[in-house]
Image (cartoon, rainbow, N blue to C red):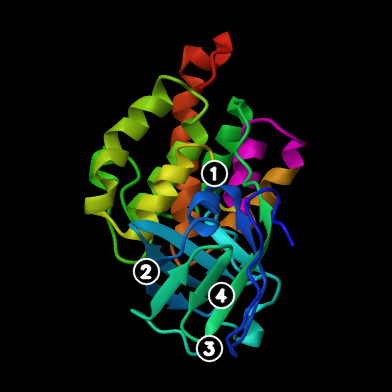
Amino acid sequence: MVGRGYGPVVALTAEQPSWPGAAPTGLAPLLAGPVHEGRVIGVHPTCVYLLVDAQLVAVETADAVGLPCAVRLGVDARLCPFRGVRRETPVSVGRARIAVGPVTVPVVRWWTPRRSRAGKDPVRIDALARALTAYPCAVPVDLPPFDLLGLGPGLTPAGDDVLAGMLVATHHDPVIGTALASSVLPTADVRTTALSAALLNLAATGQGIPALLDLADVVAGHGPATLLPGALGRLLAVGHTSGVALAWGLLRGARSVTCSPAMDEGVLA
């Protein structure tokens, strides 16, 4: 079987659990190329995080949050597909196959991650601001972007989640989006976790988890305004602090875009 021009899926010979996966096209150079060695840097019931040649690869169950850098399996976490996988477990990636401890994931198809859409709607931004007053963020939202980088505990610190929301909201603006990305991305690899650094780089291109993109699109004016409460609720349900921090970052970014002439002039990055 051929995965959309990225090479054949390698037949499995090892007697170990095999869970076919769908991989994002951005990972094709790594996943479909020669075999490289790596290690596991995080394990959760719905996801494992792999670091291969300084590049992060997530492998997710179907009921996970939907990271834009994730190889997605067709099974839920209740089947425990990552049983036996531990931190620092050796990993091999390449030739459309991931081997992580006792688990093998052949890449059987490829998918293209969504990006947030351009637009601004001051009325909806105000509605989001009013709704978020009941959900305080774990970090001060109005800190300078550089100071938010790596702020807070966890694989994705709350400060990074705020930045990710801001980057998704501003990536279409050639002035604000470029300035924001330039202020945080060059040092992200050394100031925060590998997962956060990878997600921040993706957010700068408008990529994020589906719950964030759904809310970003509604706030930007796409679809009826009645979708806003449901979209916000789904994002707030993500993680312990991540969903709230992402929403506050989206609000801050959307507010900055409303003050930018570039979006009115139709000059999009």
User: Which of the two marks, 4 or 3, is nearer to us in this view?
Assistant: 3
Q: Residue at x 42, y 68 (%)?
A: 50
Q: Tell me how far mark 3 sits from mark 2, CA to CA.
A: 19 Å
The residue shown at (56%, 75%) is 46
Task: Estimate the x, y position of residue 15 in percent, counting from the top left.
Answer: 60, 90
**Identity, as a three-letter code, of the amino acid under mark 1:** Gln
Disc with the residue nearer the chain's start (2 vs 1)? 2
- Asked if residue 51 is positioned above or below residue 225 in the image, the reply reads below
Residue 244 coordinates in the image, percent (x, y): 48, 55
Looking at marks 4 and 1 on the same chain, the residue that comes earlier in the sequence is marked by 4
Location of residue 181 with respect to 19 vertically, above or below: above
Residue beneath label 2, please?
A: 38
Instruction: Report how far apart the C-alphas of labels 4 and 1 lie in the structure.
Output: 20 Å
**Three-letter code for the amino acid on which mark 3 is drawn:** Arg
Q: Answer with left or right where residue 150 lies relative to residue 216.
A: left
Which residue bears the numbered disc 4? Answer: 46
Task: State how far apart marks 4 and 2 are (Cα).
Answer: 20 Å
Could you tell which of marks 4 and 2 lies nearer the N-terminus? Answer: 2
Q: Which residues are magenta?
A: 210-226
Residue 13: x and y in percent read: 61, 83
Check the image and report above or below for 184 versus 13.
Answer: above
Q: Secondary structure at mark 3?
A: loop
Q: Quadrant of residue 118?
A: top right
Residue receiving disc 3: 83
* Earlier sequence position, callout 1 versus callout 3: 3
Along the line of sight, the residue nearer the viewer: 140 or 104: 104
Tag in front: 1 or 3: 3
Specify few, some or many for label 3: CA neighbours under 10 Å numbering under 14, 14-19, or 20 or more: few
Quarter of image, res 224: top right
